[in-house]
Amino acid sequence: MITFLIALIVAIIFVIIVMPPFIKRMHNQGFLGKDMNKYKKPLIAELGGVIVFLGFSFSVFTSIFIATYLKWITIDLSVLLAGFCTIAIIAFVGFIDDIIGWKKGIRQWQHALFPIIAAMPLVAIAAGETTMFIPFIGSINFGIIYPLIIIPIGVTGASNAFNMLAGFNGLEAGQGIILTSTLTIIALVTGQTTAVVLGIAMIGALIGFLFFNWFPAKIFGGDTLTLMVGANLAVMCIIGNMETIGVLIMALFFVEFFIKAKHKMKSECFGIPNKKEELSPNPKGGSITQVIMKIGKGKLTEPKLVLIILGIQLIICIGALMFFFIY
């Protein structure tokens, strides 16, 4: 536990120290984006996901150092590095997307293709267990189908799903913390130390980032952040044998997918802010955020909207934890 506490603190402190000068640098270099949920559309620094990735990486390597030299924990280094490579590749894809711009970024089919390529390190070492527990059915051994098909689908699905519900101050970081914490708790209980290392590192980096991303945000995470967090969730589920729980905690994103699919994947999450910074739903709809804005009758501010979504996500994750401990 001391190792995980150290790794958590390392990630938080790294991000908190490095982020302020990085924000200043982004302003000087012109890497700025409009805050679409603010009435005056202020320009906010972008590429915050880069620092989150560095904080995450530094924390992971800290855990590896402790495991190697102090022997406080035991980890499967080959599995950990394969998972880290997958996360790093997807973070790089997100970085390229952020550099190109969210209007002219990587196309939808490329978002599906690149994560499949990124999953290859996990496929190469046949990470995870081929036997999965499916509710109401029981345990099923998928054999070679698991590494060759299920792993790439899982990485692609999780990274892109997490990227769908975003665009509000503190939302991505908040959801990332809740989702990753859920998997980390289960990994701790089941003794999946390698998965815990990834979970603790991501939680710490996201906590540090949230100091700068909560309303009013000073920096955005971008696709670098969302794709990376989604990929980390997938990797944790795979190497920690938590696939069923992973599907359950992503329920909100399945709903978001179906809503967006109904709108041919062309809708956005943003609201229409008034001078009081209250958000009205976009007439075109197409997101859970739009549904909540309609229920709020255009009176919800961005922080309230985000807290509602985080509350829903927390309830889902608590339900998933109850399912795990019961079954």
Image (spheres, grey):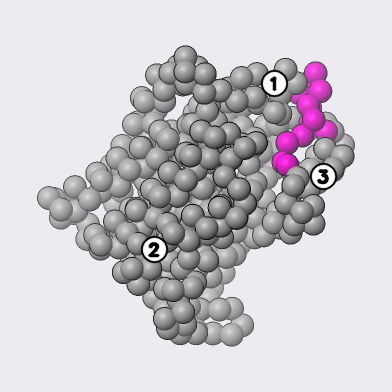
Q: What stretch is highlighted in magenta?
A: 268-280
Position of 286 with respect to 95 (left or right) is right
x, y percent for residue 107: 60, 48
Q: In this rendering, is residue 67 above or below 273?
A: below
Q: What residue is shown at x 75% (from left), y 57% (from top)?
A: 261
Quadrant location of residue 309? top right
| Secondary element type, mark 1 | loop
Q: Label 1 is placed on what type of residue?
A: Lys
Prevailing SS of the magenta stretch: loop
| Residue under pointer 1 | 41
Image marks 3 and 2: residues in contact by CB distance under 8 Å: no
Mark on residue 84? none
Image marks 2 and 1: residues in contact by CB distance under 8 Å: no
Q: Label 2 is placed on what type of residue?
A: Met
Q: Earlier in the sequence, mark 3 or mark 2?
A: 2
Please, which residue is most extreme toward the left here? 69
| Residue under pointer 2 | 120
* Classed neighbour count for the residue bearing mark 3: other residues with Cα under 10 Å, few (<14), some (14–19), many (≥20): many
Q: What residue is shown at x 69% (from left), y 21% (from top)?
A: 41
Visible in this render: residue 325?
no
Visible in this render: residue 128?
yes
Per the model, the C-alpha gap separating discs 3 and 2 is 37 Å
| Secondary element type, mark 2 | helix
Q: Earlier in the sequence, mark 2 or mark 1?
A: 1
